Image (cartoon, grey):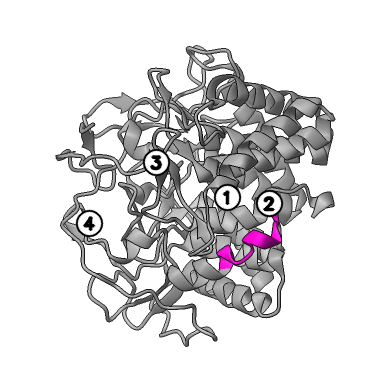
Amino acid sequence: MPDTTIDPVTTDQSHRTRPALPPLTRRSFLVLTGAAAAVAAGATSAAARPLPATVPAHGPATHGHSHGNPNAARRAAADFIQAATNAYPTLNTGPRLPQSYADELGLFSTAFVYDSALAVIALLADGRRASEQTARVIGDGLIYAQEHDPNYSDGRLRQGYNVGPYTFYDGNPQPNGFIQPDGTANIGWQFGFLGTAVGDMAWPGIALLQLFDRTRDRRYLDAAVRIGTWITTNTWSTQPLGGFSFGVNGSNVPIPNGSTEHNIDCVAFFSILRDLTRDKQWGKAADHARAFVDRMWDPVAGTFWTGTNDGVAINTFPVPLDTATWSWLALRDRKYARSLDWAGSALATTDDASATNSQLPDGETISGVTFSSASLTSTAQYNGITVNQQGVWLEGTNQLATALLDRDRRGDKPTADGLLAQARHAQDVLGVGQHLGGVVVDGGVVAASSLLDTGFGFGYFQVQHVGATSWFVFGSTRTNPYRLRRLS
């Protein structure tokens, strides 16, 4: 269903017509609700290359500075997440959420609840007292958003919120912080981030349960139970493939798609909820999600399909990274362990500054993995810039490192260490001089080494990102975000 959207990456006000939507993932909810548009220009073939056996030598760092050893890099990453949470100190003095991307992306002060959830878990993993305090502030922000929605009181969270002032592309000012003058949460209506997706509920649920387990503050458990109740009440699918459907759009209309990624999230969320509450209903919900995930397994390729558009037929293209990495972290099932090997081979990329469409500084190379099988052949354009088929998705690269460290087979740790070394180098030389709330920030990991297309109707950019940075913290601390630390 085509519509017209504003491209958020630049400050121009040109409009683009979106092509028909591909299968949905959590992230492509952005496209569904009106945040980003890709202009596809055909496709050419590109061969996937396996991850290098050793980390390639880097070219000279033309800008930026070193964060030193891995511990220093991890601390710098956690400090970036704290800076994102505290980006508007005069407006947000109580519960709040972190701005997801540096200002340069053009999404202004948008805080996606997925990124907020990752931030909570990453700050808890960092372990410093200040980090834990900030994690609690974000958790309180999620509860505030749940309890102060301007339209609903059923436990839902929106996809994104505004946490600081800006002037939108149409010239209309947005003067407030996370909490509106009337006390309601500042939902992200300018970009249309008004819907509620299952993955965007399960991840905050996991984060709140992590906070409850750490603090024993009952408010976090109660909020997680409300999230679980919303998911099971509104998205329990009775279609042949089962599982949980996608969620609702901004008009509260159900979306029939079913996402493998979302159902993986639900397996983890409901499993923890079962363990902490000893309520069998959550075990049944976890089993319902798990059955869907099992049906998505492709034994020939050794990975998982993306999901379904209607609950009946399985989508077989594109094949994303997330289902490969997250399936191991959530399920830890040996029969699916080779999905990590598929991801490390089929989606491997090396971004070289000398290549056409690379946005790396001269002399630089970054290796890792990309978003999906479609990313390797895409010739899409964003704002007139053609994507780089060998662009490295740093969030996914850190996901793979985290999963390999958790799997811990022979050779997994050296491969994971090499991937994390790539991310540390990106932390040093990419995104330098970017801003949060107009203030220069440091220590964040950019979403992608160069502009890349996901194959799901949106792209990733060389902009510091709370999500990518949080996954870097997970890998650096060997944290499985789907599990309580005491259970890992």
First in residue order: circle 3 vs circle 4 = 3
Q: Is residue 339 left or right of residue 460?
A: right
Q: Position of residue 87 (x, y in %)?
A: 51, 42
Q: Quadrant of the N terminus?
A: top left
Q: Nearer the viewer, mark 3 or mark 4?
A: 3
Q: Amino acid at mark 3?
A: Leu
Give 362 or 57, whichever is nearer the viewer: 57
In front: label 2 or label 4: 2
Residue depth check, mark 3 versus mark 1: number of the one nearer the observer: 3
Residues tagged 3 and 4 counted as in contact (Cβ below 8 A): no
As helix, strand or loop, the secondary structure at mark 4 comes to loop
**Badge 2 is on which residue?**
331
SS for tag 3?
Answer: loop
- Magenta portion: prevailing SS class: helix
Residue at the image position 76 percent from the left and 28 percent from the top: 221
Q: Is residue 48 above or below residue 235?
A: below
In the rendered structure, which segment of residues is drawn in magenta? 331-340
Mark 1 falls on what kind of element? Answer: helix
Q: How many numbered markers are drawn?
A: 4
Q: Give the number of the mark in front: 4 or 1.
A: 4
Circle 3 residue:
24
Numbered tag placed on residue 380 in the rendering: 4
The image position of residue 364, as x and y in percent, is: 38, 80
Residue 358: say if magenta: no
Identify the image quadrant of the C terminus: bottom right
Horizontal and vertical percent for residue 328?
64, 57
